[in-house]
Image (cartoon, rainbow, N blue to C red):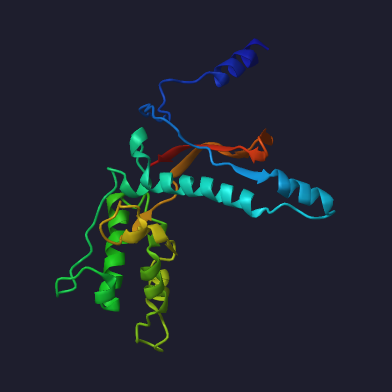
Amino acid sequence: MKDSVDLAINEGRIDRSLPYVKREGVRILRGLNSCALDYAYSYDALQAASMKPGLRLDPMLAEAARRGHMQLLNDTMLWGAPNLNMVGIANHPNITQILAADNGSGSTFCANKTPAQIIADVNNVINGQRARTLGVYPGNRFLLPQLEYMRIATTKLGVGDGNQTILQFLQAAHPGVSFEELIELASENSKGNLPDAAALAYHDRVVSGECATIFRQFGVQQINLQFRVPCHSRIGGVKL
């Protein structure tokens, strides 16, 4: 009996002589980006609704408030919040930046490139990421501005049966990568963060968004003849 008890105790003990897995990190304290975007109804609107059974107050106000909170969340994840020393995924100092190749006539824009040159640019990013991470974290998402995405989705290569598009070729060449559009990657939609259009490639296992408080609606508050619904959310930025 004693031997069996000793065996059970020994089996439950961690043997420090054997290697074991651990993770280390540095704690970085930053502020949270808070959003307090509310909506309200007037006394007259509430009075009219109460006099007509089944009449609902316009839900578009609540939807607009929620969209405003989600827009701030989206912008903070992409570009960070400079006033809080917070960076986003698209302007993080540790990401690798690659300049698109010249088309031979001095332009790096997709609009001035052949399908083969566009494919070479995309391959350069995806294959380079695989090589730099030794194949551990090859990119599985490739985001492009809206115009560039539509260009590769509708431009035919003119080879084979003539119907294959640039996007179809890339999807076949990189089956583990999801190609998507993101309008903020166009310079005019980047809130001044991008001088030119850009593409963004990453593995979603190494990127996460931190939302400390999801969108919340609180109880109605009467202010004079207005009935206000306070809304709140808090964003912690991205971990990369």
Which of these two is toward me, 54 or 17?
54
Q: Outermost residue, top direction?
A: 2
Q: How many numbered marks appear?
A: 0
Percent x, y for residue 146? Answer: 40, 66
Residue in the image at 29% along x and 47% along y = 95
Look at the image and tell me whether residue 142 can be seen.
no
Q: Outermost residue, right direction?
A: 53
Q: Is residue 198 left or right of residue 169?
A: left
Percent x, y for residue 42? Answer: 68, 45
Percent x, y for residue 77? Answer: 42, 45
Residue in the image at 55% along x and 51% along y = 67
Percent x, y for residue 207? Answer: 42, 45
Quarter of the image where the C terminus is located: top left
Q: Outermost residue, left direction?
A: 105
Quarter of the image where the N terminus is located: top right
Q: Outermost residue, bottom direction?
A: 161
Which of these two is toward me, 188 or 104?
188
When asked about the image quadrant of residue 12, the answer is: top right
159 w.r.t. 226: above or below: below
Residue in the image at 41% along x and 89% along y = 161
Residue in the image at 66% along x and 40% along y = 226
Look at the image and tell me whether residue 189 can be seen.
yes
Which of these two is toward me, 98 or 64?
64
Which of these two is toward me, 189 or 161?
189
